[in-house]
Image (cartoon, grey):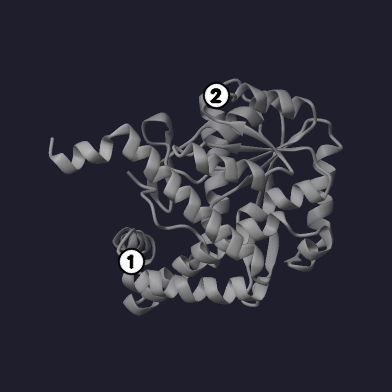
Amino acid sequence: MSLFKRIKKNHHVTRVRRYLVYLAALGLFALARWLSWEQIVSWGRRFGRLGFRWVKYGRKLTLDNLIRVFGEELTEEEILGIAERVYQNMVVTALEFPRMSSMSDREFFRLIDYEEEDIQSLRDLLKRKRGAIFASAHMGNWEMLAGLGGRLGFKMSILFKPSTNPYLNRIWFSLRSRNRLIDITKNLALVSKRLRANEVVCILFDENARSRGVKIPFFGRPASTYRGPAYFALRTRSPIACAYFIRLEDGRHRLIVERIIEPVCTGDLEKDIITVMTEMNRSLEKMIREYPDQWNWVYKRWS
């Protein structure tokens, strides 16, 4: 092993590096809380454009993923435009996240657009006394859905995977204080418990599950997908609301409850899981086709 790699893996060096990242994140979040929402959107889009042009991280993978899905439908120029806006969306979302936690309910609801029937449909799910799963994806500003649930008075738990940086976890916990958190590496049993208590569990279902998932079609190609949302819905008979917050051009956000899935148990659990997760993937595909620049293409969805 080279000297550089030995230094990089040194426990003390790792600890210092993580703490410096934590301090940088604190500075970024302090800046975001000082800016107005309009400034956050403007600056985020500006830095996103610069990031796409000058930062190589994820750029090739983003373009490869877009070409894989839209290569026969869009021109090279159109795909480049989508990719640049993907980076803008990511930066704006990163700046919006800390700002959201300090907003009043009045400020929050001024920033979102929604149909009253969509809000009512979410409320109606809990009247069945079976809990509900709010399933979303890394699209638009996905943190808005958790913020909405807390402000509507839902008892909501957020599934999360802790960062390898323990200092950063302090920030995530404080920013998500309106809701309870469920660590997917430790406490998955809490999901069923809280659904049976007629609570809401919020899940992001679009990550690559690799060897731990089941292969389900996503844009016509098999993609490893976590079983979790379907498994818990089938075990507790809880409905799944596929819901997304889409960023509007003026910086506000629109809630879209794309569909509500009622899990059906046939006696073959694995088959039922595939049926439910396939339906969820179809929901996400529909949203991505309509808003291709708002999904996070910067990772390996297909292994």
Relative to 248, 113 lies left or right: right
Mark 2 residue crowding within 10 angstroms, few (<14) / some (14–19) / many (20+) = few
Image x and y of residue 41, in percent: 59, 72
Mark 1 residue crowding within 10 angstroms, few (<14) / some (14–19) / many (20+) = few
Image x and y of residue 10, in percent: 28, 34
Which residue, as the protein is rendered here, is positioned at the far right? 127
In the rendered view, would you say 191 is above or below 64? Answer: above
Find residue 256 and name its label.
none
Q: Residue at x 52, y 47 (%)?
A: 281
**Residue 109 appears in the picture as rendered:** yes
Which amino acid, by three-letter code, is at mark 1?
Val
Distance from label 1 to label 2 (Cα)? 35 Å
* Mark 1 vs 2, N-terminal side: 1
In the rendered view, would you say 300 is above or below 55? Answer: above
Image x and y of residue 176, in percent: 67, 45
Say which element carries label 2.
Answer: loop
Residue 169 figure quarter: top right
Relative to 74, 45 lies left or right: right
The residue wearing badge 2 is 186
> In this view of the protein, which residue sits in the foreground, 175 or 143?
175
In the rendered view, would you say 269 is above or below 53? Answer: above
**Residue 139 appears in the picture as rendered:** no
Which amino acid, by three-letter code, is at mark 2?
Lys
Location of the C terminus (image quadrant): top left
The residue wearing badge 1 is 55
Say which element carries label 1.
Answer: loop
Which residue, as the protein is rendered here, is positioned at the far left? 2
Relative to 58, 213 lies left or right: right
- Whether residues under marks 1 and 2 lie with C-beta atoms below 8 angstroms apart, the answer is no
Q: Residue at x 78, y 56 (%)?
A: 118
> In this view of the protein, which residue sits in the foreground, 289 or 95?
95
> In this view of the protein, which residue sits in the foreground, 214 or 38?
38
